[in-house]
Image (cartoon, rainbow, N blue to C red):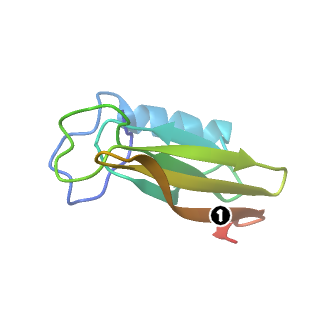
Amino acid sequence: HPFHQDAAVHKWPMLGAGRALAAWAEAGPHVLMTGHLHAWRVEPFLDRRGDGRALQIHCGTSTSTRRRGTPNDFALIAVSRAQIEITRHAGVPGEGFRATGTVAYAASPAGWVLA
């Protein structure tokens, strides 16, 4: 479940989300992977203790029949010491999954920045 979502989503965050986000900000995670909203989203979003922001990778679903107008999808994530690359694969009816785009972020003292 996501711990952060944009204003267009008409669902309450999961119980305890605020406390969890505060604890994670203190602990300093680099990446949080979430799902459940059937929507693709990759963004820096959580201020970390003293060194930038954490990156949220939010995928929809790869197998649900309740797609809510969006294709099923999944992410392939390639990580190196200084960069993370996320490739979305979306389902095409009758054809399987295809790579539909890649976004890359580089680590910087301010947090993740588009590479």
Counting other residues with Cα less than 10 Å from the Cα at mark 1, is it few (<14), some (14-19), or many (20 or more)?
some
Viewer-proximal residue, 1 or 52? 1
Viewer-proximal residue, 63 or 40? 63
Viewer-proximal residue, 48 or 31? 31
Please, which residue is most extreme toward the front here? 94
Residue drawn where x is 33% and y is 31% of the image = 63
- Residue 6 drawn at (x, y percent): 30, 58
Is residue 83 shown to the viewer in this render? yes
- Residue 26 drawn at (x, y percent): 62, 40
Q: Does 79 sit left or right of 103 as displayed?
A: right
The number of numbered discs placed on residues in the rendered structure image is 1
Q: Tag 1: residue type?
A: Ala
Q: Quadrant of residue 15?
A: top left
- Residue 17 drawn at (x, y percent): 37, 34
- Residue 3 drawn at (x, y percent): 39, 40
Residue drawn where x is 55% and y is 41% of the image = 32
Q: Does 93 sit left or right of 106 as displayed?
A: left
Residue drawn where x is 54% and y is 34% of the image = 23
Q: Quadrant of the N terminus?
A: top left
Up-down relation of residue 100 to residue 61 (above or below): below
Residue drawn where x is 66% and y is 69% of the image = 113
Viewer-proximal residue, 92 or 88? 92
Please, which residue is most extreme toward the right here? 81
Q: Does 73 sit left or right of 66 as displayed?
A: right
Is residue 25 shown to the viewer in this render? no
Q: Quadrant of the C terminus?
A: bottom right
Q: Does 24 sit left or right of 39 as displayed?
A: right
Q: Secondary structure at mark 1?
A: strand
Q: Which residue is mark 1?
A: 104
